[in-house]
Structure formats: C-alpha cells, structure tokens
Image: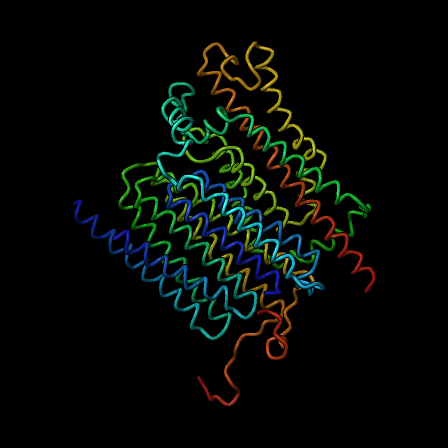
C-alpha cells in the first residue's frame, strides 16, 4: 500500500518535471517547481514510513516551509522591471528554449 | 538554455532530487542540509543576484572549444586517478577499517549522544567544523566588502513609499506569513537543539532561521526588516559565532586539555562533551544565519537603491 | 479493529495517490496557465491531506502523530496561498487567460 502510493507520487513528480522543462512561460515553471516541492514533502514522509524511520518528518517540515518561501521569493523578484511578461512575446519571438 | 530564470528553477528541482536520493540512501542529516541549503537558500540568493544582473545570459564572444578540451582532459585524468580507489561502499576500504568502526562503536560511550553524525561533526572532527565556520564567515565578509562599494545613504521615507506601494495588494500573503514566521523561528530553534537526538544541528538551524527572516523582509519590506534586525547586530553576530567556537577551544586549552578537547570542560567528561557540543553548535548556527541574512540584506539594499535611481530618472 | 484501521488507511493512501497522479496529468494536458493552477492547487492540497491522514492512522507514536498533524496544517495553509500569489503575480504582469472565442453563444 505504502509502496504503491510512493510509486504514484514518483510518477506525479516526473510529470511535474516535464512541465518544468517544457513550460512556455516562466510562471508555468514556477508552478511546476511548487508542485514538485509538495510532492517531495509527501515522498519523504512516505519513505520515512517505508523504511521505518520517522525522523524524516523533520525534513518534510523543513522542505514544505522552504518551498513556500521559494515561491514567494520568486514572485517577489519577478515584480521588478526585467521580468515583465508581455503577451505578444508568446506569439512572436520566443526567447526561452 | 539562455533563460537564467529557468535554469535557477531547474537547479532548485535538482537540489530536491538530490535530497530525495540522500533520503533513500538513509542519510538523514545530509538530506536535511541539502534540502535546506541547496534547494532553499541557494535558490533565493541566486534569484537576488539575477534580479540585479539581468535575466538572459549574454552571448559568449569566444568559442568554448578550448575550455571544453581542457575540461575533458582534466576530467579524464581525474577519473583515471580514481580507478585505483576501492569500490563505492566496499567493506575493505581503509576508511571502513580504522576510523569508522571506532566512531560507531565508541561514540555512545565516549560522548553519550545518539546521533553519530553530530558527534562526529562536532567532537571527533571539531577542527574541520571550525574550519567550515571560518570559511562561511570569510565568504560573508568578502561578499559584504564587495557590495559595500558605492553605497549611498537615502532618506528612509522614499524607500518606505516604494515598499508600501508594492506590498499593499498581498494581503493574504502577509497574513499567512505573519502566522507562519513565529512557527518557523521556533522550528529553527528546535532543529538546533535537537541535533543531538535527531537530524539537525547548527548548519540547518541557521539556514532555517535566515529563511524566516528573509521571508519577513520579502513580504513586509526591506526597511521594516532592517528596523527589526538592524545591520550592526547582524554583523556582530556573524563574528560572535566564530568567536564562541574559538573560545570553547581556548577555554579547554586553559583548563588543561588540548584545543577543542571537551572532556575537560566540566567535572564529568560526558557532561563536558555535551556542553562543548551545545556551545559550538550554537556558534555555528549564529554565524550561518547571520551570514545569510547579511548577504540577502546587502543584495536587496543595492537592488532597492538601483530601482530608486531608475524611478527618479523617469519622473 | 486493527484490520479496519489498516483497510481505511490503505483506502486513504490510494485515493491520495490517485489524486496526485491526476494532478500531474492535468498539469501536462490543460491548455492554459490559469487552468493548470486549478489542476495543481486543488489536487495537490487534497491529495496531500488524504495521504497524511492515511499515514496518521498507521502511526505508533504520539510525537510522530503531532508532526504529521503539523505537516497537514502547514500544507493546508501554504498551498492555497502560494497558488493565489502565483495567479495574482501572473495577472499583474500581463499574462492573460485563454478566453472563449467571441462567436460562442450563451452558456
């Protein structure tokens, strides 16, 4: 049961990673990283139970907090001028690769 | 990929993957440090950097072929040199035969704390940890010295106006941050002092503490954060951590033992070890937290100054 | 009694895992950024909640239970706020949602 759920979470992490690599706008990438972080929290908690060492929950708590702080940080820095996303950028020149 | 922002996001994901690998290899402390430093603070500090340098990588003016050849040759020489080393995890490697069994067998009786990683880091290898703390301190001082060039004093009212206008809309974020920050600070203290019994210790606790202060300064504005934790105090704490660590060593010298020999710090050697480990972890936590906060404050301070200049030029 | 707890816990875990995979599929297949936020925000929080409740039922020790409750509360607070902040920042910086074409009639 635990192992099946762990495999499911791994699949979800992999799908989020694909969106993080592909995603056209960078907000897509931030979303993918946020989702990856939440899945990592769950993955670490589950692995802690699978391996019988509940100390891993401390790492899960730290990771959840740092995930939140990173997303808020990225959004705070995206408010400065260089990061403005103009809509017509999507259709004409695409600078991301 | 020329978009540095995307590169930072992917680097954050990579840090998380490494943390997951360490967790599956049953190395809890390392995973903790990797998750907090590699995937948390590094992302934040790199973001502050590219907010000042620009989002896209400049086109290189020279062809990278020569550099690639040098890297390839050096890499293959290094790999050739490691072919003689014993296999990863083999039981015949020299480290497994002499030092590691001594630590694993004697840690509980000599030091008396369950977490062998902390006992090895803080007591058996205390000199190495002292070196790490001094390196962090030196790096912080170097960054600060570079960033202090061309600092100009501005009136506080202008910066407050600029900060307030961008933060009024984020009511929900401010509310939740207000609720979370005391919890994060408390958790940092828990990790610091629980390092003897579970994963944790000074480095991770310092990083979490700094992350809480950085969250506060991002959500509420840099000047409010500067009023809460003033820069002279942060500078003082940076040095105080290293000083604390060194003083523990000197006190044990003056008490008749070797440098950083905790057995002489108290009447009972085991109590002496506990006291020594507690004090040096505190020193490590102090220095790490203060250096991170110092770097972040200086980067944001320069960004604010530059934005104010641009704002003045356009109005 | 033990078998009931084990079965209930297994149901919660599997349901949570299924929701997480659905969220992952959603983030790849939805057409626009704002719809993708819906996919992750809802399924992430709910899936995490169910998995954590499933784990809580299997726990032998009070301290571990308290830590799991802390993670659950934090996830319930943090995830929606992060998605809200993300959507607000995207809207303010000009990313417009994919709206229906103008010659679609009625609801």
The image quadrant that residue B103 belongs to is: top left
For the C terminus of chain B, the image quarter is bottom right
Q: Is residue C99 above or below residue C35?
A: below
Residue A69: x percent and y percent?
54, 50
Q: Is residue B245 left or right of residue A11?
A: right
Residue A72: x percent and y percent?
57, 54
Q: Is residue B43 left or right of residue B297?
A: left
**Residue for point 44% across, 38% down:** B29
For the N terminus of chain B, the image quarter is bottom right
Q: Is residue B19 above or below residue B203?
A: below
Residue A82: x percent and y percent?
69, 64
Residue A73: x percent and y percent?
59, 53
Q: How is the image coloured?
A: rainbow
Front residue of this view, candidates B231 and B117: B117
The image quadrant that residue C87 belongs to is: bottom right
Front residue of this view, candidates C48 and B246: B246
């Amino acid at each position: 049961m635990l192992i099946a759920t762990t495999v499911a979470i791994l699949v979800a992490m992999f799908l989020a990673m694909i969106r993080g690599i592909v995603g056209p706008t960078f907000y897509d990438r931030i979303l993918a990283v946020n989702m990856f972080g939440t899945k990592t929290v769950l993955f670490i908690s589950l692995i802690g139970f699978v391996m019988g060492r509940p100390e891993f929950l401390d790492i899960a708590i730290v990771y959840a907090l740092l995930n939140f702080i990173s997303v808020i940080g990225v959004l705070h820095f995206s408010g400065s001028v260089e990061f403005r996303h103009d809509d017509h950028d999507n259709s004409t020149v695409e600078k991301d690769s | 990929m020329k978009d540095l922002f995307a590169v930072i996001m992917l680097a954050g994901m990579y840090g998380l993957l490494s943390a997951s690998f360490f967790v599956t290899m049953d190395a809890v402390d390392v995973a903790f440090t990797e998750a907090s430093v590699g995937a948390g603070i590094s992302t934040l500090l790199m973001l502050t950097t590219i907010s000042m340098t620009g989002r896209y990588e400049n086109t290189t003016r020279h062809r990278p072929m020569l550099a690639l050849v040098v890297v390839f040759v050096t890499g293959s020489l290094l790999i050739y040199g490691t072919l003689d080393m014993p296999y990863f995890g083999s039981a015949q490697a020299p480290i497994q035969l002499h030092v590691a069994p001594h630590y694993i067998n004697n840690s509980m009786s000599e030091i008396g704390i369950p977490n062998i990683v902390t006992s090895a880091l803080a007591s058996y290898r205390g000199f190495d940890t002292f070196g790490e703390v001094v390196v962090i301190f030196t790096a912080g001082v170097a960054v600060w010295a570079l960033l202090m060039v061309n600092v100009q004093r501005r009136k506080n009212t202008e910066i407050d106006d600029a900060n307030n206008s961008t933060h009024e809309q984020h009511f929900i974020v401010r509310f939740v941050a207000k609720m979370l920050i005391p919890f994060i600070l408390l958790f940092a203290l828990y990790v610091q002092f629980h390092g003897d019994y579970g994963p944790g210790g000074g480095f991770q606790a310092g990083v979490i503490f700094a992350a809480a202060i950085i969250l506060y300064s991002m959500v509420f504005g840099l000047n409010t954060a500067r009023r809460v934790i003033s820069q002279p105090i942060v500078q003082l704490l940076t040095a105080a951590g290293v000083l604390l660590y060194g003083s523990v060593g000197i006190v044990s010298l003056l008490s008749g033992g070797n440098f950083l020999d905790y057995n002489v710090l108290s009447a009972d050697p085991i109590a002496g070890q506990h006291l020594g480990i507690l004090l040096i972890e505190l020193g490590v936590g102090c220095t790490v937290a203060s250096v991170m906060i110092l770097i972040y404050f200086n980067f944001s301070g320069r960004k604010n100054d530059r934005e104010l200049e641009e704002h003045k030029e356009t109005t | 009694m033990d078998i009931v707890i084990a079965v209930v816990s297994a149901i919660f875990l599997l349901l949570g895992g299924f929701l997480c995979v659905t969220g992952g599929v959603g983030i790849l297949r939805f057409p626009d950024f704002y719809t993708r936020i819906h996919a992750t925000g809802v399924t992430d929080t709910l899936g995490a909640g169910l998995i954590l409740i499933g784990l809580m039922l299997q726990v032998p020790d009070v301290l571990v239970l308290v830590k799991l409750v802390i993670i659950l509360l934090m996830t319930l607070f943090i995830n929606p706020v992060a998605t809200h902040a993300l959507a607000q920042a995207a809207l303010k910086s000009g990313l417009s949602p994919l709206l229906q074409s103008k010659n679609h009639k009625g609801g």
